[in-house]
């Protein structure tokens, strides 16, 4: 797998962030991060495990789970808990909305501009609000044609 300059910069950034949060950057952690980044869409832990094993054949599922948690806590990947499907992951990019299939759990990015409702929500309540979530649920094309 060719590693581009851009990828190398990303890896440096990842190393910095992990070091700042007090975590050693292990080879396993880099492989898990790379597996999340290179997976299409929003992989679950098993999909990450399958990809990670191509890069490091003896990595265990437990190691993958543990490193997914560490990478999430360090802010390098995002964990999505949408609908009834199991938890999925994605590399952190611009915050964006998701559409979720109620039937099969498929998740896709939704390319519409984000609304910032946090300051409004804050004005209307006594809460100090840190994040907002808005998801759209429906049936994907597959589930619509093969119910
Ligand atoms: Zn579906
Ligand atoms: Zn997404």
Image: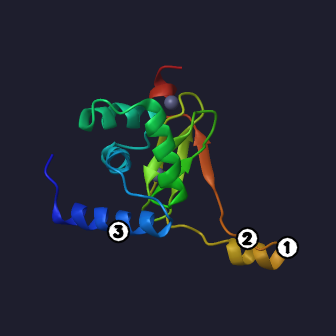
Instruction: Specify whether residue 46 is in view.
Output: yes
Give the residue pinned by disc 3.
13
What's the residue at 16%, 60% (across, down)? 4
> In which quadrant of the rendered view does residue 91 lie?
bottom left
Label 2–label 3 contact, CB within 8 A: no
Q: Is residue 89 left or right of residue 54?
A: right
Q: Is residue 146 left or right of residue 116?
A: left
Q: Cα distance, mark 2 to mark 3?
A: 27 Å
101 is higher (above) or lower (below) than 11: above
Q: Could you say where residue 34 lies in the image, as x and y percent from the top left?
A: 31, 49
Secondary element type, mark 1: loop
Whole-percent x, y for residue 73 in the image: 55, 57
Disc 1, ligand 2: is the CB inside 8 Å? no
Q: Can you see residue 44?
A: no
Left or right of residue 25, residue 147 in this image: right
Identify which residue, 106 or 46, lies in the foreground.
46
Mark 1 or mark 3: whose residue is earlier in sequence: 3
- The residue carrying pointer 1 sits among few (fewer than 14), some (14 to 19) or many (20 or more) residues within 10 Å by Cα, namely few
Q: Disc 2 or disc 1, which is closer to the eye?
A: 2
**Inter-mark Cα distance, 1 to 3:** 37 Å
- Secondary structure beneath label 3: helix
Residues at circles 2 and 1 in contact by the CB criterion of under 8 Å:
yes
Q: Quadrant of residue 57?
A: top left
Q: Is residue 66 above or below residue 119?
A: above
The extreme right residue here reads: 126
Q: Is residue 120 above or below residue 25?
A: below
N-terminal-most mark, 2 or 3: 3
Q: In this orientation, which residue lies closer to the viewer: 60 or 98?
A: 60
* Distance Cα–Cα, label 2 vs label 1: 9 Å
Where is mark 2, residue-wise?
129
| Residue placed under numbered mark 1 in the picture | 125
Check contact, mark 1 vs mark 3: CB within 8 A: no
């Amino acid at each position: 797998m060719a590693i581009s300059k851009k990828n190398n910069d990303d890896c440096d950034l990842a190393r910095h962030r992990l070091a700042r949060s007090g975590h050693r950057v292990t080879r396993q952690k880099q492989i898990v991060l790379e597996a999340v980044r290179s997976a299409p869409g929003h992989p679950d832990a098993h999909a990450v495990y399958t990809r990670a094993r191509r890069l490091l054949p003896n990595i265990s599922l437990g190691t993958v789970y543990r490193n997914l948690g560490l990478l999430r806590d360090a802010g390098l990947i995002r964990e999505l808990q949408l609908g009834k499907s199991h938890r999925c992951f994605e590399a952190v990019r611009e915050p964006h909305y998701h559409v979720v299939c109620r039937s099969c759990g498929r998740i896709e990015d939704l390319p519409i501009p984000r609304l910032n409702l946090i300051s409004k929500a804050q004005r209307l309540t006594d809460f100090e609000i840190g994040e907002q979530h808005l998801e759209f649920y429906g049936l994907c094309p597959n589930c619509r044609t093969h119910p």
